[in-house]
């Protein structure tokens, strides 16, 4: 069974085609600058094909992806009939979706309604779904939600302490994101540790440009650091994460900013970029700090401290921790981040083997032999989770 996985952003579309009989990746690629001009990058193994192609909208981009899959030179399919299902990443499923689901008109309608809670993401996801339905009307489409894995959170974890009517009327609560990633790396951790998933207390740290932490107790998300939107929680590349809410009107007053300008400041100009004044990329910040840039060092110190603080609090949530997993761009590649975060955690029984930690983008248990809490790097694979869910849903 071949499954096409799509992740549609406002001006981009990432895709992977997987053979799900063997769980192997056939091709992957990216359409960028949709609605502007259009650029395709298509990769089959080591072969990379790049082209500037007009993409006035997402439907045009989906057609270009299908052409690339069928292309005699860099494609892998002979006919569109060889695509058996499409799995769509959808960011927000609200309270309605606790699992992936086959898309019909009702599901589309609810995804549209959840757009209230994720105005930057859900509308683009929906555009991708509609484009595929139009071009491939007979191929089943499945929605896989970033929020679904966190639907197991108890009320005490997801309620905000504001008047209850805001939860009842407007569904204002913590939802959490990166669910497919937290699910994948926590399950993989259990496999690597050779222990039953439903007996482990795991803390997963998805540290990418966006970043979140999740407490996975016996296979269920019981708390996570992102909130109603992906702005809450950790310090991120350009997002502030947790902040005293009273700072917000203060910033607006001092900078004469509108609500939208303030939200943009917190989403796009804050985080390690805002504090360092250098970049949102840890390679640049690390280089600047090594040259003595104090703001860059302050950004790193604050980032590490907050990750460690969340791990401490999630250990309390679960009354213990067996394993801590690092994933995504920073978690997989920034060796110093893992080392510095773990320095705060020796009281828990974390004991890092520095030589084993000297790795980028590979699965490794970098704890010393005998360490009470295992520390692991596991490269995330959200597309594989989406494809597995899609296969499960269409096979039923
Ligand atoms: P993601 O959102 O998961 O793609 O992560 C992107 C971020 O990962 C970048 O902004 C960098 O901060 C970080 N990153 C990626 N590669 C490296 C690397 N080799 N060393 C350090 N940080 C990296």
Image (cartoon, helix red, strand yellow):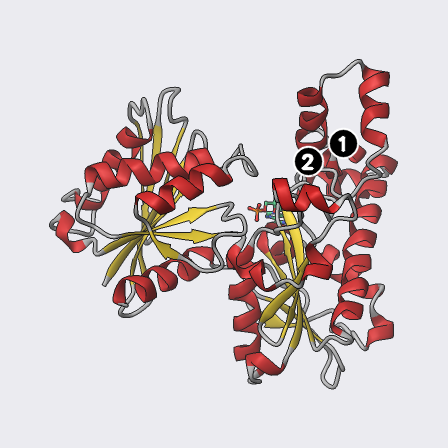
Q: What element carries label 2?
A: loop
Residue 300 left/right relative to 17: right
Picture quarter containing residue 214?
bottom right
User: Is 315 above or below relative to 286?
Assistant: below
**Which disc, if any, is residue 238?**
2
Percent of width and height locating residue 239: 69, 37
Q: Residue at x 30, y 47 (%)?
A: 104
Tell me whether circle 2 and circle 1 mark residues in contact (CB < 8 Å): yes
Residue 99 left/right relative to 164: left
Picture quarter containing residue 317?
bottom right
Percent of width and height locating residue 237: 67, 40
Q: Residue at x 32, y 63 (%)?
A: 393
Residue with the most extreme top position = 256
Q: Is mark 1 on a helix, strand or loop?
A: helix
User: Is 179 above or below relative to 161?
Assistant: below
Q: Which of 40 and 255 is in front in this view?
A: 255
Residue that label 1 marks: 274
**Which disc, if any, is residue 147?**
none
Q: Residue at x 81, y 64 (%)?
A: 312
User: Is 36 above or below relative to 29?
Assistant: above
Within 10 Å of disc 1 (Cα), the crowding (few <14, some 14-19, many 20+) is many
The mark nearer the N terminus, 2 or 1, is 2
Q: Quadrant of the C terminus?
A: bottom left
Q: Residue at x 72, y 24 (%)?
A: 262
Percent of width and height locating residue 246: 86, 32
């Amino acid at each position: 069974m071949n499954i096409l996985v799509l992740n549609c952003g406002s001006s981009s579309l990432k895709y992977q085609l997987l053979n799900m009989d063997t769980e192997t990746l056939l091709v992957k690629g990216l359409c960028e600058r949709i609605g502007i001009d259009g650029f395709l990058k298509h990769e089959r193994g080591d072969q990379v094909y790049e082209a500037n192609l007009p993409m006035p909208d997402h439907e045009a981009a989906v057609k270009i992806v299908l052409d690339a899959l069928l292309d005699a030179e860099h494609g892998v399919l002979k006919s569109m009939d060889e695509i058996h299902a499409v799995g769509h990443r959808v960011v927000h499923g609200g309270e309605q979706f606790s699992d992936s689901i086959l898309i019909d008109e009702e599901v589309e309608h609810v995804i549209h309604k959840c757009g209230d809670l994720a105005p930057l993401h859900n509308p683009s996801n929906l555009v991708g779904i509609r484009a595929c339905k139009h071009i491939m009307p007979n191929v089943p489409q499945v929605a896989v939600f970033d929020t679904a894995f966190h639907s197991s959170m108890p009320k005490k974890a997801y309620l905000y302490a504001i008047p209850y009517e805001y939860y009842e009327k407007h569904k204002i609560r913590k939802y959490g994101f990166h669910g497919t990633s937290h699910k994948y790396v926590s399950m993989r951790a259990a496999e690597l540790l050779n222990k039953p998933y439903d007996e482990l207390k795991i803390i997963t740290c998805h540290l990418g440009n966006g970043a979140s932490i999740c407490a996975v107790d016996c296979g269920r998300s019981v708390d996570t650091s992102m909130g109603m939107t992906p702005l809450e929680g950790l310090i991120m590349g350009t997002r502030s994460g947790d902040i005293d809410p009273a700072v917000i009107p203060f910033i607006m007053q001092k900078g004469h900013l509108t609500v939208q300008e303030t939200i943009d400041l917190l989403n796009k100009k804050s985080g390690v970029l805002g504090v360092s004044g250098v970049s949102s990329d840890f390679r640049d910040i690390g280089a600047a700090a090594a040259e003595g840039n104090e703001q860059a060092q302050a950004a790193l110190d604050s980032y590490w401290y907050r990750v460690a603080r969340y791990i401490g609090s999630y250990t309390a949530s679960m009354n213990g921790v067996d394993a801590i997993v690092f994933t995504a761009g920073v978690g997989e590649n920034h060796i110093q981040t893992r080392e510095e975060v773990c320095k705060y955690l020796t009281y828990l029984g974390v004991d890092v083997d520095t030589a084993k930690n000297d790795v980028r983008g590979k699965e490794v248990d970098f704890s010393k032999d005998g360490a009470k809490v295992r520390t692991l790097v596991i490269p995330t694979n959200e597309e594989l989770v989406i494809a597995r869910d899609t296969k499960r849903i269409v096979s039923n």
